[in-house]
Amino acid sequence: MHTFTAVFLVALVLTFVTRVWLATRHIRHVLAHRNRVPENFSSQIKLEAHQKAADYTCAKTGLGYFSISLETGLLLIFTLGGALTALAAFWANWLNSPIVHGAALIISVVVLMGIAEIPISYYRTFVIEERFGFNKMTPRMFVLDLAKRALLAILLGVPLILGMLWLMEKMGSSWWFYAWVAWMGFNLAVLAVFPTWIAPLFNKFTPLEDARLKERIEQLLQKCGFRSSGLFVMDGSRRTSHGNAYFTGFGKTKRIVFFDTLLSRLDGAEIEAVLAHELGHFKRRHVIKRIALSFAMSLVFLWGLGYLMQQSWFYEGLGVTVSSIPSPAVALLLFFLIMPVFTFLFQPLSSLYSRKHEFEADRYAADNASASDLARALVKLYQDNAATLTPDPLHSAFHDSHPPAALRIARLQNLAHN
């Protein structure tokens, strides 16, 4: 067995076993606390709602077993199973241009993996979400969303893939730097056009009409020094009864968006507190920091790919013979297929960084609105979204970008009393 093959298999098994173990821990922990509402929430959340959240969490986590198995199986099929080599040979019979050949190879792999994941997505939407009363989608809407996402992927993804492969072919040993610059430009462009061109493909956005709420929000925006292109309500209820609020875009394209489900559930003070939290992310420069970190990591990854694509052991260890490589596309695919296997154990660091930002945004909301109002709003959202109040701590450390409910509410209560 090739040395790198052994390294890859060890990392794959370790990641698979860890993910399954974490999911099992999570289910057992949630079920162990199913029949008792945590003391801090007992006056606000009924046992029936708490049990619903536990069952919903376990159902979603249980489905995760199939997702983990599917992802692992597909990775083995495309690498050591020889599917990537077979696809490369297939397209070589039809396409002579290395760049076009590479693009066809990447697109075919993405399409096949996407098709394989559709049944799980369908089950999640029409079985789990339906069972717990959250789903509002119809099969027709599900198919239309798939078609829209596919069209969007073609319009945005194909030029990006062709551009990246051209840079890898033409820019010599420093291609990774030019590709990184192109990648940054692409992402910033998408962020700029998302609010006005992409998001409306999937949802309807209408200006906020509630005059009293609008005045209250505008006063908060003025207090926080935030300028936006408008306050909008999104028809999230077309697809789900889950609620949320966010701001998107940057520069002159920044806009604040409320799910209609959120507006129907929270009162004015609670909505103001939720928005103050979102503004906290902006004022504490969390969005810029995360974008900067993402770009820094992408630079490291592209530099690493630049090194690995020159190493024969990288291909051979993953079941691809060097002679069968028609373009850098194979190296690109292999790298991004196996990267999650080698980075999974570092996920708690990413979660910790994200949680730090959430606590900072909560503190900003407490300073500029009301910690008590935010706490009440969060409890309502936890209940409406059937979010468990008792996650397994280790599973949460790996998978949750937000702090556990009990810890977050406790901090807000302390801020309210100070």
Image: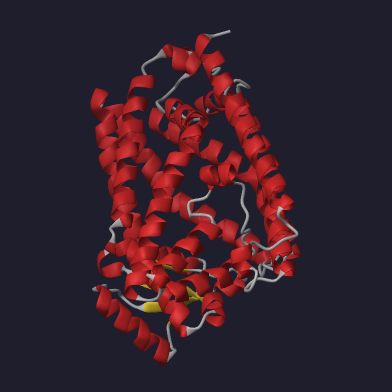
Write down the quadrant of residue 1 in the picture: top right
Q: Locate the C terminus and report the quarter of the image it occupies.
A: bottom left
Residue that sits furthest to the front in the current view: 418
- Residue appearing at x 57%, y 72% in the figure: 380
The foreground one among 47 and 133 is 47
Query: Percent position (x, y) of residue 306?
Result: 33, 25
Q: In this view, does 17 lie above or below 7?
A: below
- Residue appearing at x 28%, y 43% in the figure: 182
- Confirm whether residue 83 shows in the render: no
Q: In this view, does 198 lie to the left or right of 174?
A: right
The foreground one among 93 and 346 is 346
Q: In this view, does 53 lie above or below 257?
A: above
- Confirm whether residue 390 shows in the render: yes
Query: Percent position (x, y) of residue 147?
Result: 57, 57
Write down the quadrant of residue 327 in the picture: top left
The foreground one among 348 and 405 is 405
Q: In this view, does 158 lie to the left or right of 81?
A: left
* Color style of the picture: secondary structure
Q: In this view, does 196 lie above or below 10?
A: below
Query: Percent position (x, y) of residue 230?
Result: 34, 78
